[in-house]
Image (spheres, helix red, strand yellow):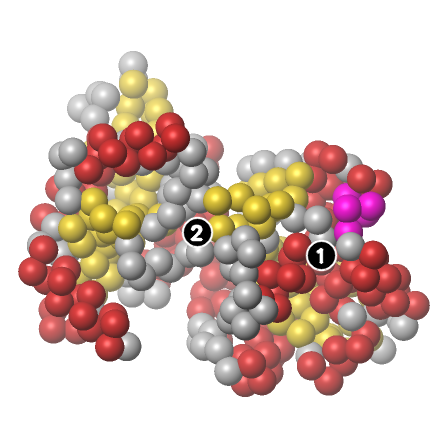
Amino acid sequence: MDDMYQVITKINPKIYNQLAYHPLQSWEWGEFKNKRGAKVVRMGKMIDGKWHSFFQFFIHKLPLGQKLIYYPRDKMFDKEKIEAVMKAAQKEGAFMAKIEPYAVFNSKNMDVIKEVKNKFNLKRSPHPLFPEYTLRLDLEAGEDVLWQQLHSKARYNVRLAKRKGVVVKEESTKEGVEAFVKLIKKTTGRQGFKAHDESYYFDMYEAFKGLDVLKVLLALYDKKVIGAWVLFDWGDFLFYPYGASDYDYRRLMASNLLAWEAVLYGIRKKKKIFDLWGAAEPGFDKSHKWAGFSRFKLSYGAKYWRTIGSWDLVVNPIKYAAFGVVEKVR
């Protein structure tokens, strides 16, 4: 039916992607998540016989037969989209939907939330998956301006990496992903944080293979890979979701050169915004667990961009409350 969101089961992925706002809303990301065990549900709306809007969300199975919907990185939602998600949740038996739009925090969007809350049980999520703040660079400023925006120490480190013989090349292939995976295993082991298993990155690569979306930049020293960044090239945006480096070669400042080469890549591809995928909130304490990489991103002149945040659409209040208790214990 025209003018209402309906479940889509068959459509040309190219048509779908033309209206997908973020790589996590792309057809390929949906196929990737489906392979990883989540059920993908795609919704679309037609106006005057033409597709006007698409979005997708994922149904995840939890222990004890419970289900949860995750709806990430779409444009700002409205009552119509929330209605569609609610109906799907009720049909699938999901007790909640976690919704994390890629939308700026402003009075207009907060008014939308107030409007939605008048009809639905929508709560600010106590357990967000994405940080509320991200850091972004305006790539339209151009290379010269962006270079001058770098903190002096960052410029020095970029030059140092070059002088020491570090070079960066694009290797957006399975071999490039393999090199990244080897480094991420070393990085997680050193820093003690949890990363995805190896197959996650290879499945992601297979999902996007053949498209000009998933990019891998490698930093090499004497032909050895000592740093790697994975980027998403999507529409007007460049995103930096994953990075890794070899601690043994930390004095060569490969990460600084990788960051600058990623900026140059974005400029060459005429991207408007480089989103560095999350940071600690402004004024963070040096003891913050994200302090290190947040300082690093800020050293490139990136500016804070506050999102509307993470929201939980509560379908079953009793099960939602129980889920909250379990999350606190974890």
* Distance Cα–Cα, label 1 vs label 2: 20 Å
- The three-letter code of the residue at mark 1 reads Ser
Residue 129 seen from this side: yes
Q: x%, y% of residue 321?
A: 13, 62
Residue extent of the magenta highlight: 146-150
Q: Earlier in the sequence, mark 1 or mark 2?
A: 2
Name the residue tied to disc 2. Answer: 132
Q: x%, y% of residue 320?
A: 14, 60
The quadrant the N terminus occupies is: top left
Q: x%, y% of residue 152?
A: 83, 56
Q: Main secondary structure of the magenta part?
A: helix
Residue that appears at 81% across and 61% down: 153
Where 296 falls versus 5 (above or below)?
Answer: below
Q: Which mark, by number, is residue 161?
A: none
Q: Secondary structure at mark 1?
A: loop
Relative to 165, is 231 on the left or the right?
left
Relative to 181, is 1 on the left or the right?
left
Name the residue tied to disc 1. Answer: 299
The residue furthest right is 163
